[in-house]
Image (cartoon, coloured by chain):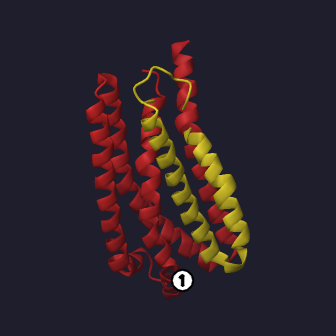
Amino acid sequence: MMQNTMLAAVVFVFLPAWFLLRDFQNHGLWLAYTLFMAARGLGLILVYCRFSKNHVWFSNRHSFI
Amino acid sequence: MRLFSFIDHTKQASFYPYTLSDVLQIVFIAQGARLGDELLAANSLLFNLMMLISYTIDGFAHAAEALTGESIGRGNRQRFYQTVRMTGYCSMMCSVLLCLFIGIFGNYLLGWLTDIPTIVKQSSIHLPWLILMPLSRRGAFGWMVFLLVRSEPI
């Protein structure tokens, strides 16, 4: 799960943001990086909430990561 | 076989994300280098300050890792959620303090790191991004942990 959220943050947030903000030079780069960090955090928060709701933490299933 | 599955889990849970984040930092530095030597120097100064931020916030992440792992091992739900909440609060407060710290003393810190005026000037132009960084980063590192913990076959 962690690699999925990470990949999603890179592919759907960092790369497009960086591509769209090329005109802003270094500021665009920093904004893209900040957005990437925020997206990763948000993705993981969503996953955490879903797992808590479905009682995944204390179940014996190990199929997810 | 159990050992191999453990390695698989660890690889998926921590190896790929951390490697990706390192690759992204290298891309970041390479892109900064394309914009000129001064910006490259300024970015590397700011990355030094970012190391300080991540060092501080990762402390809470590691604490959360150990404590949530322990409570899952004991099967103690209440303690698990309490740990999540407490480390969340602590890292939030810490990141707000870091924001204030960098906002107030950021320019002094940059002055300590280098004595070339143009680079200090370039860095301080980009300092506001660094002030935002603890807040956006806290989300990432504060919560990443809980998935890492659970990934180990217990």
> What number of labels is visible?
1
In the image, taking residue B48 as reference, residue B30 lies left or right, namely right
User: x, y percentage for residue B92?
Assistant: 33, 58
Image point (45%, 70%), residue name: B132
User: x, y percentage for residue B97?
Assistant: 30, 67
Q: What element carries label 1?
A: helix
Which residue is label 1 attached to? B122
B108 versus B3 height, above or below: below
Image point (45%, 20%), residue name: A60
In this view, the residue in front, B63 or B150, is: B150
Which color was chain A given?
yellow
Q: Residue furthest top?
A: B1
B107 versus B45 height, above or below: below
Other-residue count near label 1 (Cα within 10 Å), few / some / many at <14 / 14–19 / ≥20:
some
Q: In which quarter of the image is the C terminus of chain B?
A: top left
Image point (57%, 32%), residue name: B11
User: x, y percentage for residue A54?
Assistant: 46, 33
In the image, taking residue B57 as reference, residue B9 lies left or right, namely right
In the image, taking residue B87 as reference, residue B29 lies left or right, namely right
- Chain holding disc 1: B
Q: Which amino acid does the dot numbered 1 rest on? A: Gln
B75 versus B127 height, above or below: above
- Chain represented in red: B
User: x, y percentage for residue B101?
Assistant: 32, 72
Image point (47%, 77%), residue name: B127
